[in-house]
Amino acid sequence: MNDYEFIDGTRLSSVIEALIFASPEPISPKKLCELIAQGDEQLELETDAIEPFVDKLNQRYEENGLAFNIEHVAGGYTFSTKKRYEPWLSIFQHEDAYRKLSQSAIESLAIVAYKQPITKPEVDEIRGVDSGYILRQLLEKVLIEVSGRLDAPGKPLLYRTTKHFLKHFGINSIDELPKPREIEEILKDDDMADHRQFLMDRQLELTEMREEVDEEISEDNISLLEAVEKIKDEDEDYEAEDFESGEESGNETDSDVKSDPESEGETEIEMEDADLQNKRNGSEVTDSEDKD
């Protein structure tokens, strides 16, 4: 089918590309056809017609040297980086996966993937320990789900992997999981061993870097606390000195204001002497006037 062009000039291949890009999960050909039909009822598109458009898009990406393409996984189409970029991407992808999933979680997930549907007691028996907490973690991450109950005493729950599991590991079905013999051959491969050692060294390096940063932050926090305590102590000393100087100045002022009893007595005597002197002067003036 040739690339259909809508009234506004938009090409069908671009619409398919946009829908696949916008979908958070792999989108099926049937869903793509339904969405496209809602935008143009006159266009009748069969599900088989989607794949040729996807092939043309991938060809265009390859010709332009782009780092991604469209893959068919978990029954739908989704964007993915090309395999050739795996050495660069695997560093943080590997670290991220192992930070989110513990070794016991990965072990339990592998058991469910290869033995599904499987019950918790069966997982416990294979691992030799209780797996209840681990299975709850895998359920929360939507990597496994409950598929039913086993027809046996107690009716234990059955677990299986999810579509999110397929997407996470980039496969289209459980049949694409490597066989145990293939895994052994991969692990024996020298290149794989070197790559695994590189990842382990890189993980150790990142862990040491995080510890150094945490230690520096801790030291900075201690220094900051010491500085704050020092400032508080200086402020308290300054306030104490200021209070003492205020008391001293207050005492001096009070002593200046308070009167001395002896000085008060002397002042009264001086005032009485002044009055007597004035009376004498007055009488002398009167006598002189009478004489005149």
Image (cartoon, rainbow, N blue to C red):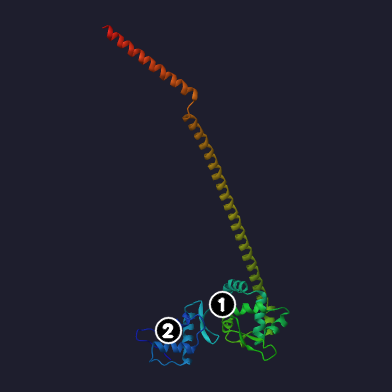
Quickly name the residue at label 1: 84
In the image, residue 196 above or below residue 15: above
Q: Looking at the figure, which quarter contains the C terminus?
A: top left
**Residue kind at label 1, given as amino acid type:** Arg
Instruction: State whether residue 22 appears in this view.
Output: yes
In the image, residue 145 above or below residue 44: above
Residue plotted at (50% across, 30% down): 255
Q: Nearer the viewer, residue 115 or 49?
A: 115
Query: Where residue 230 is drawn, which disc sits there?
Result: none
Residue plotted at (56% across, 78% down): 83
Q: Nearer the viewer, residue 218 or 188?
A: 218
Comparing marks 1 and 2, which lies closer to the viewer?
2
Residue contact between numbered discs 1 and 2, judged by CB atoms under 8 Å: no
Most distant residue in the front direction: 290
| Residue 9, x across and y down, in percent | 36, 84
Left or right: where 259 falls relative to 138: left
Circle 2 sits in a helix, a strand or a loop, which is it?
A: helix
Q: Earlier in the sequence, mark 1 or mark 2?
A: 2
Q: Nearer the viewer, residue 150 or 55?
A: 150
Circle 1 sits in a helix, a strand or a loop, which is it?
A: helix
Instruction: State whether residue 70 appears in this view.
Output: no
Total count of labels = 2
Most distant residue in the left direction: 292
Mark 1 nearby-residue class (10 Å; few <14, some 14–19, many ≥20): few
Q: Quadrant of residue 131?
A: bottom right
Most distant residue in the top direction: 291
In the image, residue 218 above or below residue 179: above
Q: Nearer the viewer, residue 82 or 274?
A: 274
**Residue kind at label 2, given as amino acid type:** Val
| Residue 197, x across and y down, in percent | 66, 71
Quickly name the residue at label 2: 15
| Residue 121, x across and y down, in percent | 70, 84
